[in-house]
């Protein structure tokens, strides 16, 4: 943690009290500068030089050119027709394509409110499990599907979901990656992210395998489990509208899949769909994470391959439906 970070968030070595109102005049000054001189003030000005200098002083390799050459990329969403609805999610390098693939697998089971939940839980686990082992660009021998690659990420995403009367749906997510990002604050007050941790490299974490498709390279954007998702009726204006997202990293895929399945297939309302217990297939180690309220049958699906089936509770998922 930088000294500036500690002064802001850990004054006197103690965290700020919950509910405390703080005033950030330094951030207000940044917004004034950007408003007066445009985005170039942030991407090609004094703030740029300051960010690069702070990162390099902390042992990093960020340069002014890295910031100056960054640009947003407008891409079409990954999308699918599922249960009579148009589902749209963020495309690569985000995990929207994985969500679309999982829903495509589940569509073949004709899930409805009449299908026992035990069966749907099993299908969701297998669909999410399988999707994580598929490479879109080529086929592999069977041995390829045994290793797994993990994406280290934390519950540190902010979400904005809005629906308007004009048929517009907005689902936006932003993240510093880990809570409080890198823990480094520039003299001007900018809290720097730790998004570089989304890349993969050898021995990053004990027991994990590096993902060659997500290797750390100059100018490359890392894989991300941020998955803002929007749903609207496939035909006409009457039907279910949904905006949903998750801040729980690698569990976003299985969580959003189950929420959408509850809303669109089982015809549950959004409140119930968010409140239902969820499961998450974890490839490394090979375990099935489940909420404590699941039945014993569901708890023992994968005991044959792994004796440890930990419980997962209190994972935040948020969404709105209309």
Image (spheres, rainbow, N blue to C red):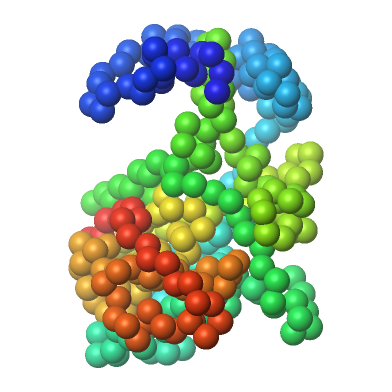
Residue most toward the front?
A: 307
Q: How many marks?
A: 0
Q: Position of residue 166 (x, y in %)?
A: 28, 51
Name the residue located 32 percent from the left edge and 13 percent from the top edge. Answer: 23
Residue drawn at x 38%, y 79% as measured from the top left = 299
Viewer-closest of 43 and 135? 135
**Where is 50 relative to 155, above or below?**
above
Among the 4 quarters of the image, the one containing residue 276: bottom left
Q: Position of residue 197 (x, y in %)?
A: 63, 43
Question: Percent from the top left, x then y, of residue 250?
Answer: 51, 58
Question: 17 above or below 157?
Answer: above
For the N terminus, give its image quadrant: top right
Observer able to see residue 124: yes
The residue located at (53%, 13%) in the rendering is 3
Question: Is residue 303 toward the left or the right of residue 295 in the image?
Answer: right
- Nearest the viewer among 310 and 30 is 310
Q: Position of residue 118 (x, y in %)?
A: 33, 86
Q: Say which quadrant the C terminus sits in.
A: bottom left
Question: Is the residue 196 above or below the residue 257 in the image?
Answer: above
Residue under the image location 58 percent in, 51 percent down: 152
Residue 80 in view: no
33 vs 262, left or right, is: right
Q: In the visual, does 112 lie left or right of 99?
A: left
């Amino acid at each position: 943690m930088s000294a500036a970070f500690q002064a802001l968030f850990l004054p006197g070595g103690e965290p700020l009290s919950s509910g405390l109102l703080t005033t950030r005049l330094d951030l207000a000054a940044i917004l004034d500068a950007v408003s007066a001189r445009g985005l170039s003030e942030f991407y090609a000005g004094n703030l740029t030089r300051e960010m690069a200098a702070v990162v390099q002083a902390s042992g990093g390799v960020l340069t002014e050119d890295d910031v100056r050459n960054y640009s947003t990329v407008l891409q079409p969403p990954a999308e699918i027709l599922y249960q009579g609805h148009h589902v749209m999610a963020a495309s690569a390098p985000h995990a929207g394509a994985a969500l679309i693939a999982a829903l495509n697998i589940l569509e073949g089971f004709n899930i409805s409110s009449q299908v026992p939940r035990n069966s749907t839980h099993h299908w969701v686990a297998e669909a999410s499990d399988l999707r994580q082992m598929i490479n879109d660009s080529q086929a592999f021998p069977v041995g390829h599907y045994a290793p797994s690659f993990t994406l280290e990420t934390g519950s540190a995403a902010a979400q904005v979901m809005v629906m308007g009367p004009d048929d517009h749906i907005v689902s936006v997510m932003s993240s510093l990656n880990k809570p409080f990002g890198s823990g480094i604050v520039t003299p001007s007050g900018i809290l720097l992210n730790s998004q570089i941790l989304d890349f993969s490299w050898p021995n990053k974490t004990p027991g994990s395998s590096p993902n060659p498709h997500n290797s750390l390279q100059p100018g490359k954007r890392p894989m991300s489990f941020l998955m803002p998702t929007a749903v609207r009726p496939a035909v006409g204006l009457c039907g279910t509208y949904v905006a949903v997202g998750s801040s729980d990293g690698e569990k976003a895929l299985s969580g959003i899949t189950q929420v959408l399945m509850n809303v669109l297939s089982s015809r549950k309302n959004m409140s119930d769909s968010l409140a239902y217990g969820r499961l998450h297939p974890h490839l490394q180690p090979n375990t099935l994470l489940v909420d404590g309220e699941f039945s014993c049958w569901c708890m023992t699906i994968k005991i044959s391959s792994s004796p440890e089936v930990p419980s997962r509770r209190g994972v935040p998922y948020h969404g709105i439906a209309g």
